[in-house]
Amino acid sequence: MEFFIDPSRCIGCQACVHACAECESHRGVSMIHLDYVDRSSSPQTTPTVCMHCEDPTCARVCPADAIKQTAEGVVQSALQPRCIGCSNCVLACPFGVPRYLGEMDQMMKCDMCYDRTSADLKPMCATVCPSGALFFGTKEEIEQKRQEKPINRFTFGRQVVTTKVHLMVGDTASDEMEFDVASFCEGVGS
Amino acid sequence: MAIPPLSEQELIQQYGPHLNYEPPGGWLAEHEPDRLVKTHCCFCGVQCGIQLKVHNDKVVGFEPWEDFPVNQGKLCPKGVKRYLQNNHPDRLLHPLIRTDSGFREADWEAALSLVVENIQRIQEQYGKDAFAVLSGASVTNEKAYLMGKFARVALQTANIDYNGRLCMVSAGAANKMAFGIDRAANPWSDIPLTQLVLVTGSNVGECFPILTDYLWRARDNGAKFIAIDPRMTPVARTADLFLPVRPGRDSALMNGILHVLIEHDWIDHDFINAHTKGFESVQAAVAEYTPQRTAEISGVPAASIVRAAEMWAEAEKSMLLHARGIEHHTKGVENVLSCINLVLATGRIGKPGCGYGTITGQGNGQGGREHGQRCNQLPGGRDIENPQHRAEIARTWKIDESDLPHSGLTAVELMDAVDTGQIKGLLSLSFNPLVSLPDTKRTRSALEKLEFYAAIDPFMSETARYADVVLAGSLQEEDEGTVTNGEGRVVRIRQAVPPPGNARVDWEIIVDIAHRLDKELLFPYAEPEDLFRELCRASAGGPVDYAGLTYAKIEQCNGVFWPCPSREHPGTPRLFEDGGFAHPDGKAQFHPVTYRPPDEDVDAAYPIIMTSGRVVSQYLSGTQTRRIGPLVDQYPGPQIELHPRLAEQYDIQSGDMVCVESRRSSVTLPALVVRTIRPDTIFIPYHWPGEQAANRVTNRALDPISKIPEFKICAVRLRKVEAGV
């Protein structure tokens, strides 16, 4: 089972964020976030869960060697005894995932619901997501169900990042996307 | 005189809304659940399956219920955080009796004696109809049935109505007129099978978030999606075609689309001839709605109107779905009929992936409107003025038909009758009219005139503050019962925990009052299933037939669609499959619609259109959801959405305080300047009370048939409020 994100389906409802905060290992604290891209021009929102890089930048830049990967490739929150709260990881992550939580003096991030997935449950966020923007299933399943294609290789300048989590990309996306309602009203007679 | 006995600040201090953020004992408490209770979310007509985690008779969290077919574990933020309404610090634990200095805790004997004493006094002094009942559409079918019977049999008043009057009645009336039955024609599982989904007047992503997945499953299968809305909603953003209709012009737009279809002969003559009546009158009525004329009325470009018709014609199968956006109008019924005309003219109904339906908004918006808590209705969707229906129900209820009251006042009319002194006493259940009715000032004036008011509620709602007696009732998870979701599927609500303290389940309170009114023999219920059995029996042979349902059957089948006339009957997910409609002649009826303007249109003095609606994190008048911390944090208070072009005229920027004035009152709120709304329209969500209430300015005018208020359009003017002024 793998994790797939399709932000184009996101309705901004925050069910994922609230559900994340219900997980037993970090109750009351959400490890993911959801943002408007630019509310003034569009209702487009985008959920941010950890992409779980094969070679995680956050772990690379951690001076305390506090960020570990499981055998399955899940990148975990900083180990609390080691984390020095420097926020290198927060600054370095190309996807903007980790957050430094002052209260806990620790970097915490999405661990793909390790306690749930290791018990054969789906991650909380992908279970509740009402739009299918977050999906947990097999690659065959999503390829069969959807027209968008999963990608997991991203280029940031000279850095190429391969991730465990896939992003769904459609072939219809264009530069011409228009969200200004005024432009949809044009051409109406007096 | 029922003016609240304390200041608003003092009332809030004592009874909230306070914000609950954590389960009982806090996040760190031991919450290993004793049991998981499979039940449903209470916060919209989708009725998502959810498992509530219970520990020591308290709801401490949730677990997704992935096997329930409607939502397959999916939930919106209201569903995820719904458990925080339980064990809430504001929860009423005792009946309260109003005193000169506030409310005092009372025992049930004292509280109910006072209620009964006042019912009897008012009815003796002013007549039976002077005591009224207002109920809700978030309650179970059992309670909806009981409230109707209680009003007619125990109180013998004609005046009972419910808050579905603010919600689904335009669709209900139009469906009855066109099809002879009031239910969505298709199960939602038909959506993924279609080739075109047309959604008009429904902010699906925020009001029925789970249905977003159905939309996408259809599109994954190649379907196209047309969205009609004055705002670019989260789902409209992704539409293949977006028609930015000017509020209040929906019927003109639908007529315009049908005009193009008829002009090109893209209609289904065989279906029209075999299964419908009255097409010629509709054909004549839409003749003048050329794309150009329709564009001028509706504000949608002619090319988009033609394109919508083309897309409808290109698809072999289509689904048309709508919600309050077209229904909350003085011509709500006409708007719905104009949609049905389109569906019937093209024969797009009664087949897999082909159909039509309103998306019911309230938790039991469907069931709540079926079993007799409406002023003109008896159980089983029967008509209170139909002699045969009256006789059938009088027999079931073991009363003389002549003792059965006739039609009473609808919710808004009823509140106005309180204001004019015709109604003196009120009992309410699960209804917060001070927030939910239009023209707040008028509602407040009415409440202040009540001689006696008893409110049943788990929380002190803004309206309950005006009560003489507040009866601590139950939350949805504290009682057994059934609810009928927006597709007509009857589902089981399970009691996860008992009501806390001295609070009681709602139906017991009502039955207790009936017994005290000497009607013991007519209300012989020991448990909710007794009520359900009687409801099913009473519905037998009626337009809404539950006769074949039992709790066990509903549980085994993950819900059963009515009509279900016998124990062997599997239920009816899709209506009209054989082309047979529910009118006596089996035919669907076309109704010609001529566009007419809204009750209050814009003019020089009030030049801007105001419309209202919901946000994803709140439910209705907020009695429950404004007490759930994480949901309040998500969208803390109402904002005025307006387009930058309009904002520029008034030098308004996001965050500026803006005063919105109508002919009734004004409301001052922060602006949210967005390009996602028509430049001639502003939007304010309605979930908040008092100074933040959108309904301070909305129009109380009613649809002549459904008596729904015109929430979706009124005329306003804007004024920027300078900081420090």
Image (spheres, coloured by chain):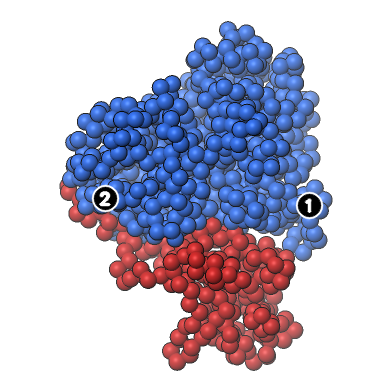
Host chain of mark 1: B
Indicate which disc, 2 or 1, sits on the residue closer to the N terminus.
1
User: Which chain is tinted red?
Assistant: A
Q: Where does the image place residue B631, in percent across and percent down from the top left?
A: 58, 55
Specify few, some or many for label 2: CA neighbours under 10 Å numbering under 14, 14-19, or 20 or more: some
SS type, badge 1? strand
Q: Amino acid at mark 2?
A: Glu
Is A40 situated above or below B183?
below
**Closer-to-camera residue (B532/A64):** B532
- Between residue B12 and residue B62, name the one nearer to us: B62
Q: Is residue B547 left or right of residue B579?
A: right
Q: Say above or below: A86 vs B20.
A: below
Q: How many numbered circles are shown?
A: 2
Q: Picture coordinates of residue B663 (x, y %)?
A: 35, 36
Q: Colour of chain B?
A: blue
Q: Which residue is mark 2?
A: B310
At horizontal 44% and vertical 60% (from top left) the residue drawn is B220
In the picture, measured across the screen, residue B713 lies left or right of residue B414, that is: left
Residue sitting at x 67%, y 90%:
A65
Describe the element under mark 2 as helix, strand or loop. helix
Residue receiving disc 1: B35
Amino acid under disc 1: Arg
